[in-house]
Image (cartoon, rainbow, N blue to C red):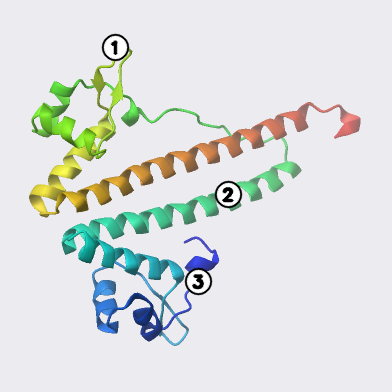
Amino acid sequence: MPSDAKHRPVYVISVAAELVDMHPQTLRLYERKGLIRPGRSSGKTRLYSERDIEHLREIRRLTQELGVNLAGVEEVMRLQHELDDIQGEFEAEIERLEGELREQAQRPDALPAPDGRLDPRDRPVYVISIAAELVDMHPQTLRLYERKQLIRPGRSSGKTRLYSERDIEHLREIRRLTQELGVNLAGVEEIMRLRHQLDATRSGLEHNVRRIQEDITDRMTKWRTLPEGNA
């Protein structure tokens, strides 16, 4: 988990409930459902962070303003928590790489191997008719989902829509949400917005990690090639 002030558990349940205009029992229910994840004091008292408060307000918006059912809210909050967790993982990875850089400054003979390969799941390959067949939908449905920005297919040089494996995954997720969980379109839009945000965040963080690894490689290479008197 990220360690900034927003994630510091500070509010007891009565204060958190007052801040979001909910009954404390509602907060306990949401915790049992895994929608929020309050911390605990040494005495096992629930303590809520500013991020928990934001999540609770988001739950209220989804249910009261958008009419999203509980299954849809669970999907949204699972993605929100995943975004929080991946940020924490990134911060931990940065700390690890910084430690590696310090260690390799003492041992310039060991060089990390950066990996700049593109995820093949993002390569646009399927025309709309094939994509529609793969997910058992009508091509017009895929065009509707694109207008709603639920999916974002690529384009060929001739402007033909081309769908990637990740687009296919997203379309199957939309079908699961609507057909199996009964999530309304507003809920699906929220969930897919978060999925796209999660994909972009993960890709951006992985790029930053690779960039740092390449920087370490470059520094260590320069270190190894310095004249003996300058080392």
10 Å crowding of disc 3: few (<14), some (14-19), many (20+): some
* Residue in the foreground of this view, choosing between 180 and 43: 180
Tell me the residue that label 2 is attached to: 94
Name the outermost residue toward the right.
229
Q: Is residue 138 above or below residue 73?
A: above
Q: Which label number is shown at residue 8? A: 3
Mark in the foreground, 2 or 3? 3
- Residue 35 position, x and y percent, is 28, 66
Of label 1 and label 3, which has the lower sequence position? Answer: 3
For this view, does 111 lie left or right of residue 128?
Answer: right
Tell me the residue that label 1 is attached to: 158
10 Å crowding of disc 1: few (<14), some (14-19), many (20+): few
Name the residue: 25% across, 22% down: 162
Displayed quadrant of residue 155: top left
- Residue 187 position, x and y percent, is 21, 53
Of label 1 and label 2, which has the lower sequence position? Answer: 2
Displayed quadrant of residue 65: bottom left
Name the residue: 39% across, 66% down: 54
Q: Is residue 20 above or below residue 110?
A: below
Mark in the foreground, 1 or 2? 1
